[in-house]
Amino acid sequence: MERRRLRTGGDRMVDGDGDVIRLRGFGLGGWMTMENFITGHPATESQTRRAMRRVLGEDAYEAFFETFLASFFGEDDAEYLAWLGVNCLRVPFSYHHFEDDAAPFELREEGFRHLERVVRLCAGRGIYTVLDLHAAPGYQNQNWHSDNPTHWAHFWRHRHFQDRVVHLWEALAERFADEPMVAGYNLLNEPADPSGEVVGPFYERLAHAVRAVDPHHTLFLDGNTYATDFTALADLAELDNVVFTAHDYALPGIANPSRYPGQTRGRHFDRGIVEESFLRRTEFMRSTGTPIWVGEFGPLYTGDARRDGEVLLLLDDQLDIYDAHGAGWSLWTYKDIGTQGVVHADPDGPYLSRIRPALEKKRRLGTDSWGGSEEQIRHVLEPIEQLVATEFPDFDPYPWGSKQWINLLVRHVLLAEPLVDEFAECFRGADPVEAAELAASFEFGTCVRREPLEQVLRARLR
């Protein structure tokens, strides 16, 4: 089995026989760390879980989430990935599955149990896994996907939160040290340290702590500012068996309206521009002679035939660029409710039918940062933007400036929080049996496959 264990070999990943293995696959977003656009809830996972527990009661709440975790990825999903030709699954998880904020450093077995099940399912089909801490205590970035209900990343200011992540990764490394089909540990998804002064030393501390327990597995390190900036990681280039991970979302794939090739938000995009962006984001890897792995990328689908056809062309161009540069990749995301996944819940199935009123209101108010639109609330945003520009012309908050800062506060906090209770009310009256049936809407056999995306991927993976 040791011949299957991966490590870096110059600018490539190699197995125990020295054969080059280019990791290509998906991220399992929405499973052990739920995201609003993936599973349909507003705001953050923790806010939604608290509201659903109040509405459902303990028994139905537990029935829903145990079924959800079992249904979202099972035997059929692993078989499907193998059929596509995937050899890697990046597995994001939230610390909440391992530790309660009221009992820090007391780890729970259930989190390990869920991870081990998916690792085994994938390993049995020759698929490597990359374990990804997606939501850390104190929030390592300013957005919903770290379960952050605010716009402050407290992780970088409080040693307590950092200590808990070190403790968790030591336990994970001990548990998976002898698992050769775990390709490595993605220590922290999309860190966003505003100072840029903490992330490098913290990574170094965490890397040494993990290596003291497990000296063999590859460490995957996302750049600062949402895996785009590697300036603060320069001192880590001498670490052995490390992959520096970039995320490569191309604007025409995530903006709506967009054209590809063509104009998106006043800029022209074509294959050459997309490649220039990729080369800029991965320059650090080439300068250090380390492997290139794109930990996240991928377009959003709207149901508009013209646009969806163009973003599939964009995706194919990105895959062609990655092939040309020997880059591995992990497409975001595998399964959802229809925005980005290659597999998605049936729009007419019990779960989406049940939450449809909340989904319609979410779309109307544009509360989701990812896949949502501000179009119908421009009359709210515009005067605030003008006021801030007039009164604070030099205000340029980290990481993306004042316009995105206002969007986050108005759409994702001010308007999304009240929607959490309305979403939970959609489940009013469901007993444990019905709650489990709703969660089972994510089973592979009840889901819909995005066949045009399948065709693009199979052509590249076969």
Image (cartoon, helix red, strand yellow):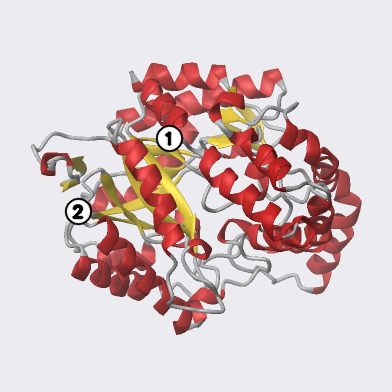
SS under mark 2: loop
Q: Decide if residue 156 is on the left or right side of residue 182.
A: right
User: Can I make out residue 228 in this image?
Assistant: no
Hey, what amino acid is under mark 1? Glu
Q: Residues within 10 Å of mark 1 (few under 14, many from 20)?
A: some
Q: Residues within 10 Å of mark 2 (few under 14, many from 20)?
A: some
The secondary structure type at the circle numbered 1 is helix
Query: Which residue is rendered at x = 64% and y = 23% of the image?
Result: 308
Residue 235's disc is none
Q: Residue at x 83, y 43 (%)?
A: 375
Quarter of the image for the C terminus: give it.
top left
Q: Which residue is mark 1?
A: 275
Please state which amino acid type lies under the numbered disc 2: Asp
The N terminus: image quadrant:
top left
Determine which residue is flagged by label 2: 178
Nearest to the observer: residue 100 or residue 41? 100
Q: Is residue 57 above or below residue 316?
A: below
